[in-house]
Image (tube, rainbow, N blue to C red):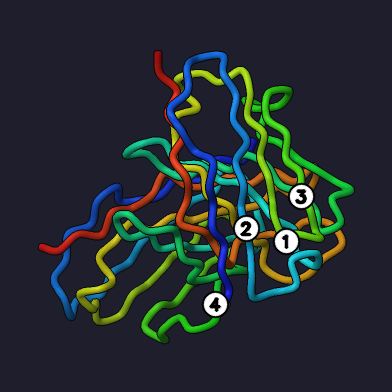
Amino acid sequence: EIVLTQSPVTLSLSPGERATLSCRASQSISTYLAWYQQKPGQAPRLLIYDASTRATGVPARFTGSGSVRDFTLTITSLEPEDFAVYYCQHRKNWPPRFVFGQGTKLEIK
Amino acid sequence: EFLLVESGGDLVRPGGSLRLSCTTSGFMFKKYAMSWVRQAPGKGLEWVSAMSGTGDTTYYEDSVKGRFTVSRDNSRDTLFLHVSSLRADDTAIYYCARHLGTTTTVGWYFDLWGRGTLVTVSS
């Protein structure tokens, strides 16, 4: 069973700074990884899929990278609306099973 | 505008059952696989179930297998989740989510989400 481990659990930064969030898979998952943003009281929003493809309407300051087991979501120059919880997600090929990381909370310092 | 609206959540006693609905609009529902994803209070996201666009194939997370049943009515653009034998650890917001891209089976990611419906299991 694939496990996704996100780090750090909490990241405290100021607007304008650069955020680097990590997601590590317990085994190789190629580039089958997505990133979601969730704000309090809201549904998750797809940001990145296939490790590095930005979803429709996602600002260019969000960049996904990585492959095999180690993945990174980078947010350059944080905007106030970027402070949220971020989850990574993978789908096992067969039978399909979807797994999420435990989340990283990006909070204002 | 793409819309997914969940309903049917309620306070229910352990062992009870509910039917959750997800009404959609703005896209060709029958072309898309759909999933239910839940989130316990203050916790992370947990995938529950998926169904192909035609309804031919379904998948479940192990802890809900045999207790939850996903279905869809493509003539009404609606996804359902029948939840039964409910336990306290089923307490969560239940989101429906559209799979990214049209496919004959299920997709890899979720590109549209509803706002969720709260299921509370308590005596």
Q: Are marks 4 and 3 on the same chain?
A: no
Q: Position of residue B46 (x, y in %)?
A: 52, 41
Query: Which kind of residue does numbered mark 3 sit on?
Result: Arg
Q: For the C terminus of chain A, give its image quadrant.
A: bottom left
**Label 3 lies in what chain?**
B
Camera-nearest residue between A29 and B69? B69
Helix or strand or loop: what does disc 3 sit on? strand
Q: Which residue is mark 4?
A: A55
**Label 4 lies in what chain?**
A
Q: Residue at x 63, y 23 (%)?
A: B84
C-alpha separation, residue under disc 4 versus residue under disc 3 = 26 Å
Badge 1, how many Cα within 10 Å: few under 14, some, many 20+?
some
Query: Which kind of residue does numbered mark 4 sit on?
Result: Ala
Q: Which mark is residue B52?
A: none
Query: Which kind of residue does numbered mark 2 sit on?
Result: Thr
Q: Which residue is mark 2?
A: B23
